[in-house]
Amino acid sequence: MDEKRNIIRIDGYEKVTGRAKYCGDLYFDRMLYGKILRSKYAHAKILNINYEKALEIKGVHGVVTSWDVPGEKTIGAIRFDHFPFATDKALYSGDGIAAVACESEEICDRALEAINVEYEELPAIFDMFEAMKKESPIIKEEFDSNILTHYPLRKGNVEQGFKSSDLILEREFNTQFVEHAYIETEAVIAVPGEAKDCYEIYGSIQCPHSTRKGVARTMGVPLKNIRIIQANMGGAFGGKDDSMTILAVRACVLAKKTNRPVKVVYSREESIIDTYKRHPYNLKYKIGVSKDGKIQAMKVLMYADSGAYLSMTPFVTWRSVVQATGPYEVENVETDIYGIATNNPYTGAFRGFGSPQIIYAQESLMDEVAEKLGMDGVELRRINGYKQGSTTASCQKLEGHKVSLMEAMDKVIEKSDYFNKKEEFKIYNAKSERFKKGIGLSCSFRGCSLGAEGTDATGAIVSVQADGSIYILAGLAENGQGLKTTFSKIAADVFGIDVSNCSYLPQDTGFIADGGPTVASRSTLMGGSAVKLGAEIVRDRIKDSVKKTLEASSLDDIVFENGKVINIKNKKEIEFKKACEIAYFDGKNITAYGWYKAPDVYWDEEIGQGPAYFTYVYGSQIAELTVDTWTGKIFVDNAYAAHDVGNAINYTGTLGQIYGGVVQGMGYGLFEEVDVQDGFIKNTNLDEYFIPTVKDFGNIYPIVIENPDKYGPSGGKSLGEPTIELMSSAINNAVSNAMGKRFYKIPIDLETIVTGKQLKRKQKRGSEA
Amino acid sequence: MIEKEFEFYKAEGYTDVFNYMKKNYLPFAGGTDVMIKVKEGYLRTSGLLYIGDMLELKGIEKKDNSIFIGAAEKLTDIIKNTIVKENFPGLIQAIELIGSLQIRNQATLGGNLANCSPVSDSMPILMALDAKIHIVSENNRKIIELKDFPKGVCQTALETGEIIEKLEIPIINSKNYQAYRKFAQRPEVSIQKCSTAVVFEYENDEITIKKAKIAIGAVAVRALRCEKAEQMLKGQKLSPELIEKVANMVSEESKPISDIRSTREYRQKMVGEGFREIALKSV
């Protein structure tokens, strides 16, 4: 690794030494503890809630239900359909019915037991196809059917395309519910403010401004009355967005009722039961290719289980529809995706956001097509893969940035010695009865930031102090991904100083403008650009102040380098510190707000056409593994990951993202599955829900590709999500390569390899329906 | 969450133990299983009695051709012990697979047996090693075979007022081979799907099996000895055909169910597979 590019994480000291306070560590005077009573049924009418007995218990200070929500009863990022407290009906097993505030968590448990809820159980639906039947009951009254969303995409004429194909292949794939499994469970403290109807909320909150909207709406107060202060975060992976708004609302209603600070920390079981998962998909792919390997047509039909609430299903499924045919030129495309309501746990945002499912399917399919054509999957990808100026399924011409798909594939193939290994393994496998080795590749393109999902703009404050040290605060939040370090580096680079001169201020909705959610791998690209703009404004003001001292005839002659401000014409220079002091005494405002609005994008929802995203990233991963055919154990000996990041601003962080994403992708492909049976989650802790440990994989080789993008700060763009979306299909292809047998469901667990059947038991399709 | 406040007492000796047990206190040593049950509200006792520091329950010693391990010896200390290592490599193999390092630093062998979970990692290998349990109560001492100790899921032969004092494992004087194979999704921090423990004792020729002992875990309400398979191996030399045959017998002797951790089919296949793997490695 390039040592010079190894920068130290600016919030590393406090995290390594244990000084960093997480929400669970915070304490307020007179603070109470809150707990949630959840539904006994996956679908039920709530007839009556009697909590008088709970109130008689010593140490119980308040019980709240939907009746105590002073404002609107619902929240929702896209549509207001989610009840933090079930109002008439419980729609899934994690639905909150009531909450208690008590002097200890132990008393909370007793109070919850003393609450008597009368339910009328309703027919529940746990299967998407059951939900779509005409005679099935409609789960969500505000929708006219259980189909919550539908995104079509039409390009060319698929029938014609299939007619001119020499090979047509139809395959069906299935993916599973997945848990984020962040190390820190959800935690919030709601504190009644001094002013009337004002609340401060501290918490492990991924998108503080989104949470503020939900809390203000349900508390029936203006946005300014709610301040969300983000505590240090122990991970989010997309999972602490609307789930945290739900929790914040619950805590805030308790705080209002008791007029005391209320802390709610979910146990691991509650975390798994209550909050959203990754969408399980059913994917049906039909592909037509000519003999020479050119794809003629693709028809894709997908269903995503939204569970009981809409949450992010529209945006998640929209990304799927844009990217469903993969990074391949296809003239004739017909894609449809449906988001379906069931009484399962609800699904929402999760690192990857609608891409891991489709890439798993489409990249597995590509290898199978190639096999049928008698060529290597790589060759098929080279024939059809995006090159400079290629056109996407939505007829967007890929230009204005470097289309680096082939570069990513070439590099990962070279690093892994893909073709030689394939030959080697063929010989090895012919001799070995028990152990089989395989290697597999996958590749992808990914639209950066929100795209046509919605408004895409964000801001940052860069505040230079008189001694040359700097405060930074941006509208996007640190969730563990390393944003504080990256943003500080961007500002430090503008001033030509070391990143250690920067401090990052706590995220507080009272101090920074709403810059949209911290999602979609948009932080570096969007927030980084805002930081850069802010820093440049301040830099130019400093230039103006030191112009005289440096005897510069033009501001353009002044540069900031190596801690100095230099006139490049006459070589006169002063320390950066000194320059800041001069500007300060010159009365200059050396604090500035940078604001960055993304270039326009567009999407026609009727036909699914348009320039969906303003720029894209490309990546390719390879899995090299050993299958123990006797026990079913699959061990990834080596994983290779090549990603175009534009510019690796925070190089150490870049490597970290790749390592983490690759391993999370292995978990997705090999053993992670939330086992939902009849609407209830069976594996509610990490002893039964398996995430990979450091002993579960061999080596990971990151390959960082840098083709600077004109829109990103110093050319940097997206990385967080691309890293997780490729491994499951690379593994699937490697397993096929090893065993000569294909699998169409993930996870490929031990049971699948040995018995041909996944561990997860088949659940009922519905309780009565 | 702890439902109610618990009385807690630290026993200094047997007098304390038996007095408090009469008051329905639950004795525990490491607490890695008991504390979770307390937290989840499963235990109905009036109090907890800590016996983990009692000298009577400590110590690892070699005496009369047996090795004795005190019930309150921590797993980590057993792993590090040279007498155990020399005589019972199979036991070390099994204990190293229990929980995580942190758990092993705290948990005790006596506790693992008394908890008597069907997925215990120490039980199958100890059974295959013909271990005996020394039980003590106020007025009595007795020794029972470990294979007779588990009675069901988390149910043991311990009667009211009795605790485990120590474990006795007979030293095998002839050449032998011991191994434990655990099947789990992860190599570390993982509860078994099923397991196989094997001990071969050889004749003087060092190939003919004098005695074979096979125990399987997590394929019934308690760990089992596969007596039919053991019988089949007696006086035999291992051959590929014999290994195959016995592996199938081991599978047939298992009675697994399907649950959250694995399927019946997988478990049944794997316990046999475990035998096959160990047998192949032994030759």
Image (tube, rainbow, N blue to C red):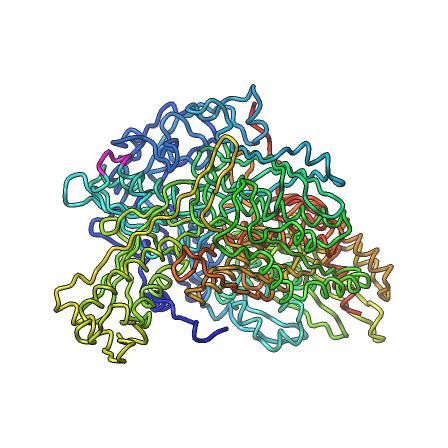
Q: Position of residue A742 (x, y in %)?
A: 72, 48
Residue A466 lies within the magenta run: no
- The residue sitting at the top extreme is A135
- Kindly indicate the quadrant of the structure image that contains residue B280: bottom right
Front residue of A432 and A145 = A145
Name which residue lies at 47% across and 22% down. A144
Q: Position of residue B275 (x, y in %)?
A: 75, 59
Q: Is B176 left or right of A612, judged from the image as shown?
A: right
Q: Is A252 left or right of B198, judged from the image as shown?
A: left
Front residue of B85 and A587 = A587
Name which residue lies at 71% across and 55% down. A631
Camera sees residue B204: yes
Front residue of A503 and A595 = A595
Q: Position of residue A616 (x, y in %)?
A: 49, 51
Residue A218 lies within the magenta run: yes
Q: Position of residue A424 (x, y in %)?
A: 75, 66
- The residue sitting at the bottom extreme is A571
Q: Is A412 left or right of A182, judged from the image as shown?
A: right
Give the extent of the magenta segment: A217-222
Camera sees residue B2: no
Name which residue lies at 18% across and 45% down. A193
Front residue of A438 and A571 = A571
Vertical comparison of A631 with A169: above or below: below
Work out which quarter of the rendered image holds the C terminus of chain A and state it: top right
